[in-house]
Image (tube, rainbow, N blue to C red):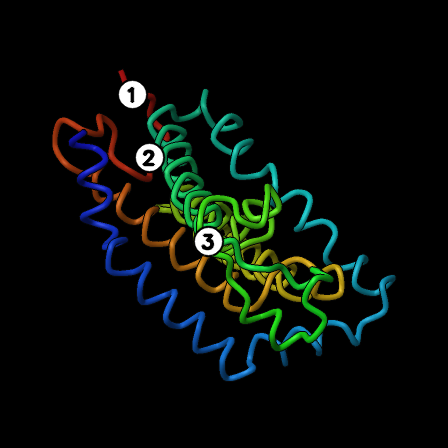
Amino acid sequence: MRYIFSIVKNSYIILLIPLLYGGTILCAQMGLDAAINKAARLQSEFISSIWSELPLHVGSVAPFLVPLLIYFKSRSRSLLIAQSVVFTLVIVTALKAITSRVDPENISVIDIYLRSNTFEFGLLENGLISVVEGWPSGHTATNTAMAIAALLGASPRIKVAGVLWVIWVVLATIFGDRGGVHWFSDSIAGMAIGAAIAYAHISFYAKPNTYQAPVGQGQKSP
C-alpha cells in the first residue's frame, strides 16, 4: 500500500491525468489531431510500413522483455523497470476502458474531425477495442517508462539510443499504419504518463531500505 501511495503521490498522476485530458480535448477541438492524422494518411501503405512496423511490433513486447533480459545482470534494475512498466500499463488500461476514445480507423464516425472528438465514457463502451487503440497510447506510455527506468545511469550513447527509440515509437503510433494507430494527443499523453510513473519509481527505489543497490550500478541485490 505504501508503494502505491508513494507512486501516485510522486508521479502527480491525479493532477497530471486531468491536465492531459484537457490538452487532448484542446487538440481535438482545435482540429490538430484531425490535421495530423490527415497528413499521416498521405503516405503510401508501403512507405508507412517500411519505417513503422518495427517500432509498432517490437514496441509491443520490448517493455516486458527488457527487464527479463537484464534480470541476471541487475535484479534491482530489472524490478525497477518491470514495476514501472506494469504500473504504467494498469493506469493506461484503466483510462482507455473508461474514456473509450474512438480510434482513427473507426468507420462508425465518417468525419475525421468528429471522430477525433468522440469519447464514449463508461466501462468499455466501445468494446475491447477501447483498451487497444483508445486514449492514452499504451505503446508510448510503456516504452517511455521502460526507457527512463532502464537508461538511468547509462552511458551517453546508450541514453541517446534510448531517446531515439522512444521518439521512433511515438512517431510510429501517430504516423505509422497511415495514421491508423493513435491520435497525436493519445501518444503525447501516453508518453507523459509513462515518464511521470517511471520517475516516481526511481524516487521510490532510491529511498533507504527500499533499493539495496544504487540505481545505475550493475550489482545484484541480496
> 158 or 66, which lies in front?
66
Residue ID at (51%, 47%):
143
Residue 194, percent from left and from top: 40, 51
Residue ID at (62%, 65%):
174
> 159 or 22, which lies in front?
22
Residue pointed to by mark 2: 217
Q: Please tell me which of labels 3 and 1 falls first in the chain.
A: 3
For the residue marked with disc 3, what is the amino acid?
A: Lys
Secondary structure, mark 1, is: loop
Residue 26, percent from left and from top: 43, 78
CA neighbours of label 1 inside 10 A, class few (<14), some (14 to 19), many (20+): few
Relative to 115, is 145 on the left or the right? left
Q: How many marks?
A: 3
Secondary structure, mark 3, is: helix
Residue pointed to by mark 1: 221
Residue pointed to by mark 3: 159
Residue ID at (50%, 68%):
185
Residue 12, percent from left and from top: 23, 55
Residue 89 sits above or below residue 1 on the image: below
For the residue marked with disc 2, what is the amino acid?
A: Gln
Relative to 198, is 110 on the left or the right? right
Residue 154 visible to the viewer: no
Image quadrant occupied by the N terminus = top left
For the residue marked with disc 1, what is the amino acid?
A: Ser
